[in-house]
Amino acid sequence: MADTRLCGQCGSVFEPRREHSRFCSSVCRIKWVREHSAGPAAPADALAWSIAAMAEAADRLAQAAGQDLLRVGAVMSEAVWWVTIVDATMVRYEGDAYDSVLDGLPGEEARLIEETLAGLRYVRNQVGIHLDPAEFIRSAPDGTWTWNPLPEPCLESLSPRGKEWEMSRYRAYQSRLAGHDVAAAIALTSAFLTKTAWAEPPASPADVTILDNSL
């Protein structure tokens, strides 16, 4: 069964391209943002400091070689939280720019980024609730940290749709994160999200309509 949801602006039923999509079109997304924004600079300001916090967390994780397991687990958890928060914000409110940047990448690179982000969402959902942060990572012989392979989660409390989403995140974690460098996954996704945040958004029907009405 296809995943469907109601548009957060017009209420119509649509099939989301991304996990965090809330709107059926760029027109509805732009209308919602303009109606709920505290001011023209508010969304950009909030995104700017969120990206700065994400970059700082990524830097701390990159420098975590040689530190103890509990400390690295805490730093990893913070970095994952910031990456997934910025990612969800970009998908929901800057979806055109997000898709434009992603679609412009070579196919394998785009899949790597999408699946790495999905794997990090799995970490975010599990850490501190079902698993301790330290259970996700282990020290490699060279002093760096890698992601631990994990057993399949118990998802009995979730709805069928929820189980499908969480299993897709788990599979992405196993294929793209498990056995690989922890800091590298954060650096990859942080760089993509930073690039996307400052990308020039493609022209949207809403912008064209507003321009026409101003003539």
Image (cartoon, rainbow, N blue to C red):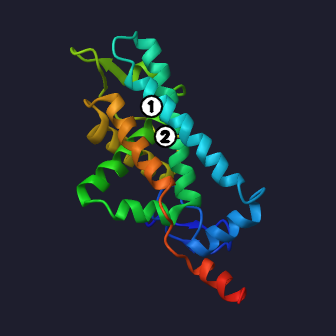
Q: Residue at x 47, y 47 (%)?
A: 194
* In this picture, residue 59 sits left or right of residue 214: left
Q: Quadrant of the C terminus?
A: bottom right
Q: State yes or no: discs 2 and 1 in contact (Cβ < 8 Å).
A: yes
Q: Earlier in the sequence, mark 2 or mark 1?
A: 1
Q: Residue at x 36, y 29 (%)?
A: 183
Looking at the image, the residue that sits furthest to the left is: 141
Q: How many other residues sit within 10 Å of disc 1, few (<14), some (14-19) or many (≥20)?
A: many
Q: Residue at x 49, y 71 (%)?
A: 202
How far, Cα to Cα, is label 2 from label 1? 9 Å
Q: Position of residue 54 (x, y in %)?
A: 51, 36
Tag 2 residue:
83
Q: Quadrant of the N terminus?
A: bottom left
Secondary structure found at label 2: helix
Residue 39: quarter of image: bottom right
Q: How many other residues sit within 10 Å of disc 2, few (<14), some (14-19) or many (≥20)?
A: many
Viewer-closest of 59 and 11: 59
* In this picture, residue 142 sits left or right of residue 116: left
Position of 35 relative to 186 (above/below): below
Q: Residue at x 49, y 40 (%)?
A: 83
Q: Position of residue 38 (x, y in %)?
A: 78, 56
Residue 58 is tagged as 1
What's the residue type where badge 2 is placed?
Val
Residue 133 appears in the rendering: yes
